[in-house]
Image: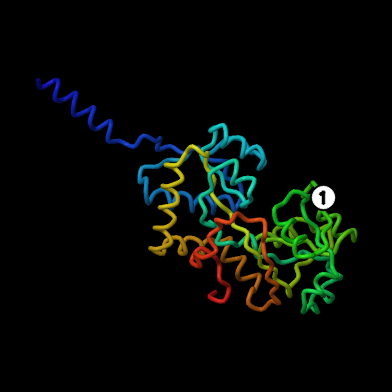
Amino acid sequence: MKVFNTFFLVFFIALSLPAYSQDIKIRNIDGSKEKLAFDILSLALKKTRPDVTFSPSNESFNEARLIEEVISRNIDIIWAGASPEKEMKMLPIRIPILKGLLGHRIFIIRNEDKERFSSIKTMNELKSFTAGQGRFWGDTKVLKSAGIPVISTIKYENLFYMLEGGRFDYFPRAIHEPWVEVDSRPELDLAIDNNVLIIYPFPLYFFVNKSNQDLHDDIYSGLEIAIKDGSFDKLFFNHPMIKDALEKSRLKDRVIFRLDNPHLHDKTPFDRKEFWLDISEL
């Protein structure tokens, strides 16, 4: 009877344990943005799975391959810019993990054009200039929908040389991106415009496999807890990349143009103001 009771107790405990693995397979962590996204993921999941561990991939994949890795369950979670296509293939956690920062865009320009850009005051004046973008980037559609002239290319690196060569006039970048990009290409006579800021909704989400509802729910709940208890904002605004970007970009001192993003899912949480960056509160 004692052996039976011991067996029953072990069996009951086993049934009480979570059915999911505590080890989460993630993409590789390469660069400040990826490190911040991972830190936010870790913060959220440790609110709901205190014993969680993470196993980063040893390989570096492009976004299309990362999506396939999630679908095939070789990777449990990725983070990527929102789009209807991704939200059909995977299960999104619809809380923008960078507070919509990717939709705050300032420009890399030719050094000789600083004065031309400093005089822009209206949308019509901005539309007299041509932007350069990646052909398949989600925000390329946003600019085109707003009537902004765009020239695109497949290769990211080409954009810097096309800009210097006069193929287009400016390269819109998220506010944490342009300084490193310009400084790492001293052979090109490029600069960062100090006048214009474009803002449009463009969330970066966590995505999991469509069948992994438990992981989705635990991440969502953990993010909600972190936002409510203040630990999310503490992590976000104290991250060196964010602090440096906000200090250098001087968002409040710029001419702001707000664009719609008609390419987002109708479940995008626009009504949750606490999810989004409000530059008036900086």
Residue flagged by tag 1: what amino acid is it? Thr
Kindly identify which residue carries mark 1. 153
Which residue appears at 89% of the width and 58% of the height? 167
Above/below status of 81 relative to 61: below
Which residue appears at 9% of the width and 20% of the height? 1
Image spot of residue 255 (x, y percent): 71, 77
* Mark 1: secondary structure: strand
Q: How is the image coloured?
A: rainbow
- As drawn, is 114 to the left or to the right of 175? right
Above/below status of 235 relative to 92: below
Count the labels in the image.
Answer: 1
Q: Quadrant of residue 249?
A: bottom right
Q: Nearer the viewer, residue 10 or 202?
A: 202
Image spot of residue 51 (x, y percent): 36, 42
Q: Name the outermost residue toward the left.
A: 1
Report the quarter where the C terminus lies.
bottom right
Q: Nearer the viewer, residue 19 or 33?
A: 19
- As drawn, is 173 to the left or to the right of 26? right
Q: Nearer the viewer, residue 58 or 95?
A: 95
Image spot of residue 247 (x, y percent): 61, 71
Above/below status of 27 relative to 269: above
Q: Residues within 10 Å of mark 1 (few under 14, many from 20)?
A: some
Which residue appears at 13% of the width and 25% of the height? 5
- As drawn, is 147 to the left or to the right of 90? right
Q: Nearer the viewer, residue 89 or 60?
A: 89
Which residue appears at 56% of the width and 44% of the height? 78
- As drawn, is 13 to the left or to the right of 112? left
Image spot of residue 214 (x, y percent): 42, 42
